[in-house]
Image (cartoon, rainbow, N blue to C red):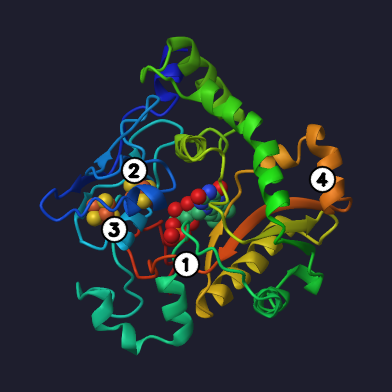
Amino acid sequence: MLEFLKEGYLPETTFPVRKVDPTLCTKCGMCWETCPTAGYAWKRREIPSPVGYGGLAQACINCGNCISVCPAGAIQMTGAYQVKAGRYKSMLKGEMRYPTPINQNETREYTSYEKDLTPVEQTIFTRRSHRLFKDKIVPEELIARILEAGRFAPSAGNCQPYKSIVITNRKIIEELERRSMPSLRLSKNLYLEGSGRKKPWKNILFTLLSWFMVNKLDPRPMAALEKSDQIKGKFYFNAPVVILILKDKRGISNPDLDAGIYAQNIVLSAHSLGLGTCYISMPIIPLNLPLLRGFRQRIGIVHPYEAVTSIAVGYPKIQIDRAIKRDSPPVEWLRD
Ligand SMILES: Cc1cc2nc3c(=O)[nH]c(=O)nc-3n(C[C@H](O)[C@H](O)[C@H](O)COP(=O)(O)O)c2cc1C
Ligand code: SF4
Ligand code: SF4
């Protein structure tokens, strides 16, 4: 039993170490604004400081956005998020590397061979999740154009088991945020500790729960919830367009997977057209709760459809689209 508990919940977690060079930083705050996890504490006209909270040593998921966004090149980041042992032991190598689709064994900078890549490869490698949008309307023709890219995604049995709801009505986006926040806030408060040290009973509870809810209890989404709280629940970041992606529950085989492929076609096509996007799954669990049935029906989520994710779309306020480093999931080759 003791071993089971020791093995349990997130023992020995390492986080990336971020450093802001005070001699370069212009105190613009854009790293703070674009970070999905409230990884920096920042006040106007001050240098941001990397932080953790609620029992997390650092609030950082290695997304690289702060480095992409920083106009002064003031941020250095080393290391990676890893759980060293137990049920959540990381399968990632902790090796953050730039894309190397060709010349895999060389250490050349991505930009030195970008010109040798196809336009599709360039679109894939330079896409970033945007969380700063211009207050500018996206023409409906452009939204229809990116949805058309989704329509031509592969799907099991070619049954296209999805539906999109395009929301450009600001009041509905705000209502979605407002209605989702109470349950999100509740789960965050249960999970994180204001004091920074997790109470022993919580460790035991989450250890037990993590057997049954293995992909629901990672701390990283909790760090993103903290960010939402800090920006008054505006987890769509004032995006002018939100596309809700629904699956048709009767779809062949695995409609969640089909909906994901559909969504990614939309996201890549948007990036190729100069639009910024960010997947936002935060409201999906609350949206599917019985409590929000009336709201769901009002916005068109009715049987046989169910929300899978959503995509914020808009014109980027600043340019962050560039290749960043990413960890490497395992690849095994079974050769002749
Ligand atoms: C299914 C899915 C759900 C996501 N949900 C959120 C979200 O709720 N809020 C958010 O800020 N980012 C969300 N993201 C964006 C990820 O944080 C982002 O893709 C990741 O950090 C890598 O950064 P990049 O997209 O810039 O490469 C989501 C991404 C995916 C694929
Ligand atoms: S790498 Fe991403 S998550 Fe980490 S501090 Fe920078 S913006 Fe935030
Ligand atoms: S984005 Fe760069 S320059 Fe701006 S506050 Fe952050 S570290 Fe400083």
Image disc number at residue 81: 2
Residue 254 visible at all: no
For residue 327, what is the image quadrant? bottom left
Q: Residues within 10 Å of mark 1 (few under 14, many from 20)?
A: many
Asked which secondary structure carries label 1, the reply is loop
Question: Which residue is found at the position 79% from the left and 74% from the top?
Answer: 158
In the image, taking residue 274 as reference, residue 103 lies left or right, namely left
Q: Could you tell me if the residues under marks 3 and 4 are in contact, i.e. CB atoms within 8 Å?
A: no
Q: Position of residue 335 (x, y in %)?
A: 42, 72
Q: Could you tell me if the residues under marks 2 and 4 are in contact, i.e. CB atoms within 8 Å?
A: no
Q: Mark 3 highlights which residue?
A: 67
In the image, taking residue 187 as reference, residue 202 lies left or right, namely left
Question: Which residue is found at the position 41% from the left and 29% from the top?
Answer: 10
Q: Position of residue 296 (x, y in %)?
A: 82, 45
Asked which secondary structure carries label 2, the reply is loop
Gap in angstroms between the C-alphas marked 2 and 4? 36 Å
Is tag 3's residue or tag 4's residue first in the polypeptide sequence? 3
Q: Is residue 66 above or below residue 314?
A: above
Residue at the limit of the structure toward the left, as seen here: 23
Q: Residues within 10 Å of mark 3 (few under 14, many from 20)?
A: some
Is tag 3's residue or tag 2's residue first in the polypeptide sequence? 3
Q: Nearer the viewer, mark 4 or mark 1?
A: 1
265 and 278: which is toward the camera: 278
For residue 320, what is the image quadrant? bottom left
Q: Mark 4 highlights which residue?
A: 296
Q: Residues within 10 Å of mark 4 (few under 14, many from 20)?
A: some
Q: Mark 1 highlights which residue?
A: 316
Q: Is residue 206 above or below residue 41?
A: above
Q: Nearer the viewer, mark 3 or mark 2?
A: 3
Is tag 3's residue or tag 1's residue first in the polypeptide sequence? 3
Q: Is mark 3 within 8 Å of ligand 2?
A: yes
Q: Nearer the viewer, mark 3 or mark 1?
A: 1
